[in-house]
Amino acid sequence: MLVNSEGYSERVTPDNGRKETTGVFLAIVVILLLGGFWGSQNQVDVTPPPKHLSLSVIEKAVLVALINAGDEILFMAENGDSLPQIDELIASDLPPFSSQIQDVASYRWQQLKGCYLGIPERAESSAQFMLTFDGGINVYWSSLVTAVEHTLETKNCHPDASWQVFNNA
């Protein structure tokens, strides 16, 4: 309390932050509400995971082996010859055609004009694979559920819409 010489007194309230607390609280609430609103308006589209991640571990091993085998097959056919026969690939011990992968994932391999087609022989594998060489090494796979009809009739190396391509090959 202040008292001057004339006897006049004025009550002065202490500045202990009681008035600021309400203002600061309201400012924080407004900032959080605005941030929540703008955050919900600026959502990024969800990117689907790459399709090859849906393959089982065994199928991923076959996929990687096919990617690596593509370069080796091109090297074997480098001097203008046609693509090597399945028997030559097995004799060269080239996965996935060799026994290294066949012990884990048994596939029946067929050679078509310009490509190799692998159809699983065991129930734990549900994907079939195609290795083509049109414009580079292309590895395709397809679920047996969606493409079992196409497998039996596939006589060419042109996959239809039921096949997925591995773009990093």
Image: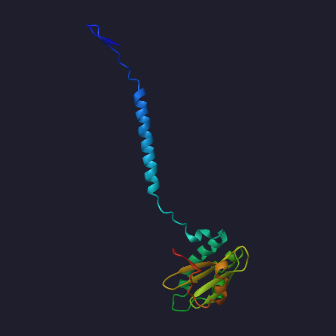
Question: What residue is drawn where x is 29% and y is 10%?
Answer: 8
Q: Quadrant of the N terminus?
A: top left
The image quarter in which residue 93 lies = bottom right
Question: What residue is drawn where x is 65% and y is 87%?
Answer: 110
Q: Measured along the vertical axis of the image, is residue 96 above or below residue 83? A: above
Residue closer to the observer: 165 or 2 = 2
Looking at the picture, the colour scheme in use is: rainbow
Residue closer to the observer: 107 or 151 = 151
Apparent side of residue 113 relative to residue 31 in the rendered image (left or right) = right
Residue closer to the observer: 138 or 53 = 53
Residue closer to the observer: 140 or 58 = 140
Instruction: Indicate the position of residue 68 as horizontal and vertical percent values.
Output: 57, 76
Instruction: Indicate the position of residue 65 as horizontal and vertical percent values.
Output: 60, 75
- Identity of the residue furthest to the left in this view: 6
Instruction: Indicate the position of residue 161 as horizontal and vertical percent values.
Output: 56, 81
- Identity of the residue furthest to the right in this view: 123
Question: What residue is drawn where x is 51% and y is 92%?
Answer: 80
Q: Can residue 85 be spotted in the picture?
A: no
Question: What residue is drawn where x is 43% and y is 31%?
Answer: 21
Q: Measured along the vertical axis of the image, is residue 46 above or below residue 68? A: above
Q: Can residue 131 be spotted in the picture?
A: yes
Apparent side of residue 91 relative to residue 169 in the rendered image (left or right) = right
The image quarter in which residue 121 lies = bottom right
The image quarter in which residue 129 lies = bottom right
